[in-house]
Amino acid sequence: MHDIITLADDPDLAHLVDLIDMLPDPDETSFWGQDSSSISGKIGHRLRAVLNGRAYAKDVDYLAVYVLKYLGRGNGHITEEQITKNLTGVGQVPAAGYAWVEDATRTAWTLVNRYSLPNWRGSRTAPGKAWLEG
């Protein structure tokens, strides 16, 4: 996968960007953190490639992994409660925060599998091959 991936190419990627747009602006350090390796910096680096139409599979994969790591279900960085409190347009409705985390986790996991699985499997291994042997 060496082609550029755009929002028009992948509806799951477009959906993840829409979800990220519901969060505070990247300069809101009370939500994202403030050091040079802040969560918004990590997500933003890959997100800018996507938004500028210059994203490759590794950019989409890293963006999705960062969402899983820093915003996904059970993460130790930005809690569901923090997300609920800071979601744009939903007025701190607990169910909305829960739904956002579940949706972001599921969407990011879909993207990780789509763009990482060929690397995990290796170029010579067919899907399910291990189950056919033996």
Image: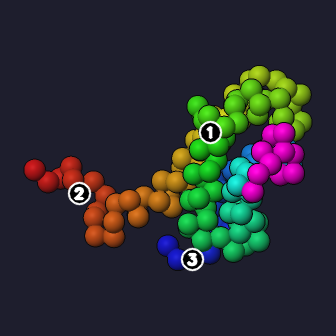
In percent of width and height, residue 116 lies at: 47, 60
Left or right, residue 69 beside residue 17: left
Please name whichever residue, 34 or 100, is drawn nearer the observer in this view of the structure. Answer: 34
* Callouts 1 and 2 close, C-beta under 8 Å: no
**SS for callout 1:** loop
User: How many labels sit on residues?
Assistant: 3
* Callouts 3 and 1 close, C-beta under 8 Å: no
Left or right, residue 48 beside residue 118: right
Q: Main secondary structure of the magenta part?
A: loop
Spatial distance from mark 2 to mark 3, Cα to Cα?
27 Å
Is residue 13 visible in the rendered image? The answer is yes
Chain part drawn in magenta: 26-36
Is residue 21 visible in the rendered image? The answer is no
Please name whichever residue, 99 or 23, is drawn nearer the observer in this view of the structure. Answer: 23
Amino acid type, label 1? Gly
Please tell me whether residue 28 belongs to the stretch shown in magenta: yes
For image coordinates 62% across by 51% down, the residue present is 66
Amino acid type, label 3? Asp
Q: Which residue is mark 3?
A: 3
Mark positioned earlier in the residue sequence (1 or 2): 1
Q: Which residue is mark 1?
A: 72
**SS for callout 2:** helix
Q: Is residue 84 above or below residue 47?
A: above
For image coordinates 28% across by 64% down, the residue present is 125
In percent of width and height, residue 38 lies at: 73, 51
Query: In terms of image quadrants, where is residue 71?
Result: top right
Q: Which residue is mark 2?
A: 129
